[in-house]
Amino acid sequence: MTGRTIGNLILMTLICVVSFFVFAAIRPTPAGTPVTLNNKEIIGEWCDYRYEKEMSLFPKLDEDCGDGILNIQVNGIKGWEHSCRYTAVKTWYDPTIPTATKTPTGALVSRIEMTCAGEGCTWRERVTIHLGKGYLAYKSNWRSKDKCEGRRVT
């Protein structure tokens, strides 16, 4: 073999290896693989008494939250008469969020995409959640139209 042939062989091998890793990195998650939340500090039961697009929830202690309970679990969220299963979760560190008074700023933020069902309807939703200054900031960024037992409702 000549030097040129060996060089071509090495180049082709390198291209194959790089192609393998690129396609392995971009392939979708196999169906049936559970999507889980890795932001442990927001897992648990939270209370809120308002129903808005953007909520501030507080840790559930001994009081009864009534309709305002939200139970954030590793694989989904359960609320009053509805439940959601995660389809995608992205968690990152945001250094600008104040976590407590007189402490350095910074908190983990999770953007969660989920499918939900409740009271005969199903929908998809995307929320952003983070813990800061003793409360849970819960913001619904997007929600699909409800599909209720064969008819669409807004």
Image (cartoon, rainbow, N blue to C red):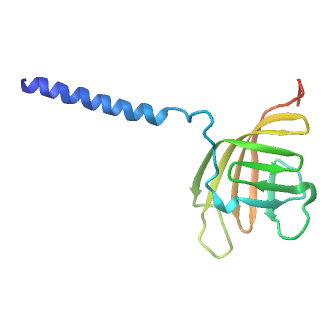
**In the image, residue 105 above or below residue 37:** below
Residue at horizontal 60%, vertical 63%? 106
- Outermost residue toward the left? 2
In this rendering, position of residue 137 left or right of residue 92: right
Residue at horizontal 72%, vertical 46%? 127
Please provide percent x and percent y for residue 3: 8, 27
**In the image, residue 38 above or below residue 135:** above
In this rendering, position of residue 35 left or right of residue 73: left
Residue 44 placement: quadrant: bottom right
Residue at horizontal 54%, vertical 33%? 28
Image label count: 0
In this rendering, position of residue 84 left or right of residue 109: right
Please provide percent x and percent y for residue 144: 78, 33
Please provide percent x and percent y for residue 41: 66, 62
Q: Nearer the viewer, residue 3 or 52?
A: 3
Question: Considering the image in quadrants, where does the N terminus appear?
Answer: top left
Residue 24 placement: quadrant: top left
Residue at horizontal 93%, vertical 58%? 66
Please provide percent x and percent y for residue 101: 68, 74
- Outermost residue toward the front? 32
**In the image, residue 99 above or below residue 148:** below
In this rendering, position of residue 134 left or right of residue 51: left
Q: Nearer the viewer, residue 145 or 42?
A: 42
Residue 83 placement: quadrant: top right
Question: Considering the image in quadrants, where does the C terminus appear?
Answer: top right
